[in-house]
């Protein structure tokens, strides 16, 4: 693994990309409603993040490993909140 300016750029980009799901998760948490949230979109995001994490491991790229693991966690958190707040 190497850390250089390119990897630094990946770290910053990954941080922004990984945390882009945070506002949605917080809104669901606050309102208790995830009615208008697309579960398919978050499922696809979780699968993509898991695949990018694997790619990052195979390539030895810390930014890909770290931030896609965070993205996977965020996407699955939104999915959990989506299905926990379903109207009965």
Image: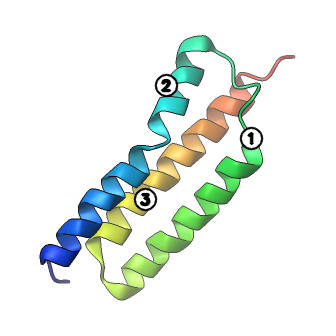
Instruction: Select label 1 or label 3 by which is in front.
Output: 1
Query: Up-down: is 70 above or below 52?
Result: above
**Would residue 35 be found to the left or right of residue 79 on screen?**
right
Residues at badges 2 and 1 in contact (C-beta under 8 Å)? no
Which dot marks residue 16? none
> Circle 1 is placed at which residue position?
38
**Would residue 42 be found to the left or right of residue 13 on screen?**
right
- Seen at 45% across and 43% down, the residue is 20
> Circle 2 is placed at which residue position?
26
Q: Residue furthest top?
A: 31
**Would residue 69 be found to the left or right of residue 47 on screen?**
left
Locate residue 55, reporting x and y percent: 46, 80
- Seen at 21% across and 74% down, the residue is 7
Locate residue 37, reporting x and y percent: 71, 34
Residues at badges 3 and 2 in contact (C-beta under 8 Å)? no
Label 3 secondary element:
helix
Which dot marks residue 69? 3
Locate residue 64, reporting x and y percent: 37, 70
Within 10 Å of disc 3 (Cα), the crowding (few <14, some 14-19, many 20+) is many
Within 10 Å of disc 2 (Cα), the crowding (few <14, some 14-19, many 20+) is few
Cα separation between marks 1 and 3: 21 Å
Cα separation between marks 2 and 1: 16 Å
Q: Which quadrant holds the C terminus?
A: top right
- Seen at 27% across and 72% down, the residue is 62
């Amino acid at each position: 693994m190497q850390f250089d300016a390119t990897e630094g750029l990946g770290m910053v980009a990954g941080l922004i990309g990984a945390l882009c799901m945070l506002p949605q998760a917080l809104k669901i948490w606050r309102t208790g409603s995830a009615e208008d949230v697309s579960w398919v979109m978050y499922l696809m995001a979780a699968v993509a993040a898991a695949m990018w994490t694997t790619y990052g491991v195979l390539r030895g790229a810390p930014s890909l490993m770290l931030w896609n693991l965070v993205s996977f966690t965020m996407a699955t958190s939104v999915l959990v909140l989506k299905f926990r707040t379903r109207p009965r």
